Image: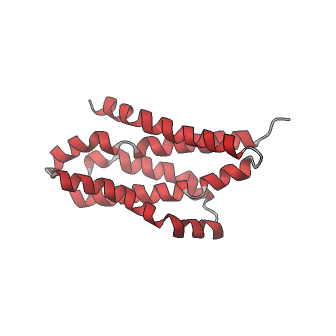
Amino acid sequence: MKNPGYGKIYAISFGHFVHDIYTSFLAPVLPVLIERLQINYTLAALLTVAQRFPSLFNAPAGLLADKISFRYAVIAAPTVSGILMSLLGIAPNYIVLLMMLFGVGISAVIFHIPTPVMIKKALPDKIGFGMSMYMLGGELARTLGPLIILAAIS
């Protein structure tokens, strides 16, 4: 009988791919956002800071994840990131854009904290394989994401 843990690994890795493909959209669309919102390079750089800032709270989020189930949050996080990143181009102003990217950052924390634990639980005797598939999903997303968004906006 085939180990059902492999299906879980592939599902989590695909979720990682979906989540990270959207989060990789910011850099390629920055020139468009700079022009549309008439912001300088400092303000543009702060957009990346807004997206990454929630990761400073990984430790408290990890402690929380040890106490409560993040299972449904892991399912919702790619959806939240996808929606927010897809709406960047219609943000009415810089502050809304900052808040959207901060929300994407929170979504990333919610997704990335519990998923490695889920990998370990799915295949406890194949953690290396599970994590390699998980990382492949993320790296493939960060490779293809910019190409996809550039094709969409060009």
Which of 87 and 51 lies nearest the eye of the viewer?
Answer: 51
Q: Position of residue 9 (x, y in %)?
A: 67, 42
Which of 35 and 88 lies nearest the eye of the viewer?
Answer: 35
Looking at the picture, does residue 29 appear above or below residue 106? Answer: above
Looking at the picture, does residue 59 appear above or below residue 151? Answer: below
Q: Tell me if 100 is positioned left or right of 77 in this view.
A: left
Please indicate, yes or no, whether residue 93 appears anywhere in the rendered image.
Answer: no
Q: Residue at x 56, y 37 (%)?
A: 136
Q: Position of residue 117 (x, y in %)?
A: 65, 55
Which of 46 and 96 lies nearest the eye of the viewer?
Answer: 46
Q: Position of residue 49 (x, y in %)?
A: 32, 57
Question: How was this image coloured?
Answer: secondary structure
Q: Residue at x 26, y 57 (%)?
A: 46
Q: Tell me if 76 is positioned left or right of 152 in this view.
A: right
Q: Quadrant of residue 71?
A: bottom right
Q: Position of residue 45 (x, y in %)?
A: 25, 53
Quarter that holds the C terminus: top left
Q: Quadrant of residue 113?
A: bottom right
Quarter that holds the N terminus: top right
Q: Quadrant of residue 92?
A: bottom left
Name, please, the residue furthest toward the right: 1
Q: Tell me if 87 is positioned left or right of 19 in this view.
A: left
Please indicate, yes or no, whether residue 123 appears anywhere in the rendered image.
Answer: yes
Number of callouts = 0
Looking at the picture, does residue 95 appear above or below residue 82? Answer: below
Q: Residue at x 30, y 39 (%)?
A: 28
Q: Residue at x 50, y 64 (%)?
A: 58
